[in-house]
Image: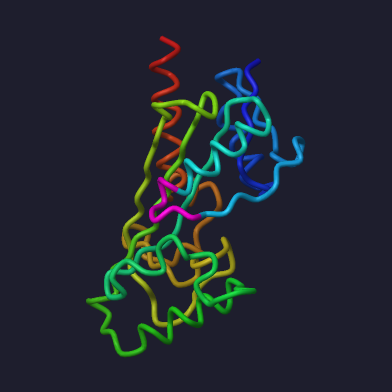
Amino acid sequence: MQQIVLASGNAGKLKEFNQVLADFDIEVLPQSDFDVGEVEETGLSFVENAILKARHVSQVSGLPALADDSGLEVDALKGAPGIYSARFSGPGATDASNNEKLLSLLAQVPEAQRSARFQCLLVLMKHPADPTPMICQGTWEGRILEQPQGENGFGYDPLFWVPECECASAELAPEQKNKLSHRGQAVAELLRRLALQKS
């Protein structure tokens, strides 16, 4: 059983990765097992931040590390909130304050110009100096609603309209969201590439 460390304190993500990687004899451990402190996300892109997180966790733990960086890009806002999605409304940002700020910035933007997408960049590093980390990307296209809908999910899910399902991301069942979402797509790509390595 190979062990890799997840560069996140999110219990939901840890459970999800353990479920999908079990078939590959990979056990995903939380970074808290190694007393890993937060690394400053100084990158200018999702991929740079994911690499920073994975490298830091691999350095501290001495094991391969898996990190993801994700966020929302809104075309009318020139790609914002982007890498600042989690802290869009400033220090002490919450999902509610971030959503409020997004809606206020888009108040005058007509529906046809509210296109947006979630991006997820997933990085698997074999060791801290890995010159060719495995990088997997998932992109989920949609648009921003004028008011929140749905009770599921987190973050910007209540404002993200999913055209193929004709509902907000926050109205999808978790299994359905995991199949469609940016993270679901990035994980599927990771599994595809791990399967190729195994064969």
Residue under the point 36% across and 54% down: 140
Tell me residue 70's x, y (percent). 46, 53
Which of these two is toward me, 10 or 111?
10
Q: Quadrant of the C terminus?
A: top left
Q: Quadrant of the N terminus?
A: top right
The image's colouring method is rainbow
Which of these two is toward me, 76 or 39?
39
Tell me residue 32's x, y (percent). 75, 41
Q: How many marks?
A: 0
Residue 182 lies, with reference to residue 104, above or below; the image says above
Residue under the point 65% across and 25% down: 62
- Looking at the image, the residue that sits furthest to the top is 199
Tell me residue 18's x, y (percent). 63, 32
Residue 143 lies, with reference to residue 132, above or below; the image says below
Tell me residue 35's x, y (percent). 76, 41
Residue under the point 27% across and 69% down: 75
Position of 139 with respect to 103 (left or right) is left
For residue 64: magenta? no
For residue 46: magenta? yes
Residue span colored magenta: 42-48
Q: Quadrant of residue 40?
A: bottom right
- Looking at the image, the residue that sits furthest to the left is 112
Residue under the point 54% across and 25% down: 127
